Image (cartoon, helix red, strand yellow):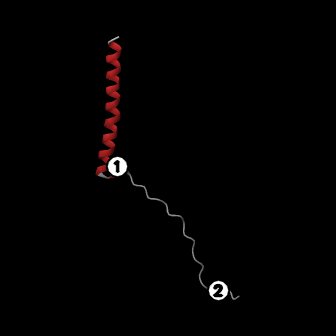
Amino acid sequence: MPTSKKRPKKSKEAAVPITKNPLKSKLGKIMVLILILGFVLSGVVGLIYTLITALNM
């Protein structure tokens, strides 16, 4: 069989998924703000509830 003089095909590397920073979009900023407020408010409400139950004993 004759040897081919065609160029060999280059092997393609696996595509790396592109990740985006959520803080770059307006919706992302709103979502992060909602999460932060949820965590902070749940902690404050839990603390107030614990203090009320402790003082009623």
Residue 26 or 56: which is nearer the viewer? 56
Q: Quadrant of the N terminus?
A: bottom right
Q: Residues within 10 Å of mark 1 (few under 14, many from 20)?
A: few
The residue at the point 60 percent across, 79 percent down is 8
Query: Residue pushed farthest bottom?
Result: 2
The amino acid pointed to by label 1 is Leu
Judging depth in this view, the residue of 57 and 9 nearest the camera is 57
In screen coordinates, is 6 left or right of 40?
right
Estimate how packed mark 2 is, as few (under 14), some (14 to 19) or many (20 or more) residues with alpha carbons within 10 Å: few
Which residue was labeled with disc 2?
4
User: Would residue 54 be found to the left or right of residue 13 on screen?
Assistant: left
List x then y, in percent, for residue 5.
63, 86
Disc 1, disc 2: CB below 8 Å? no
Q: Secondary structure at mark 1?
A: helix
Mark 1 vs 2, N-terminal side: 2
- Taking the view exactly as shown, the residue that stands out farthest to the top is 57
Q: Residue 3, how many percent across, how many down?
A: 68, 86
Q: Marks 1 and 2, how far apart in space?
A: 53 Å
Q: Is 44 placed above or below 27 here?
A: above
Residue for badge 1:
23
Residue 42 to residue 1: above or below: above
SS assignment at label 2: loop
Expressed as whole percent of the image width and height from the top left, the position of residue 14 reads 53, 64
As drawn, the residue found furthest toward the right would be 1
Residue at image location 33% in from the left, 52% down from the top: 24
Residue 44: image location, x then y, percent: 32, 27
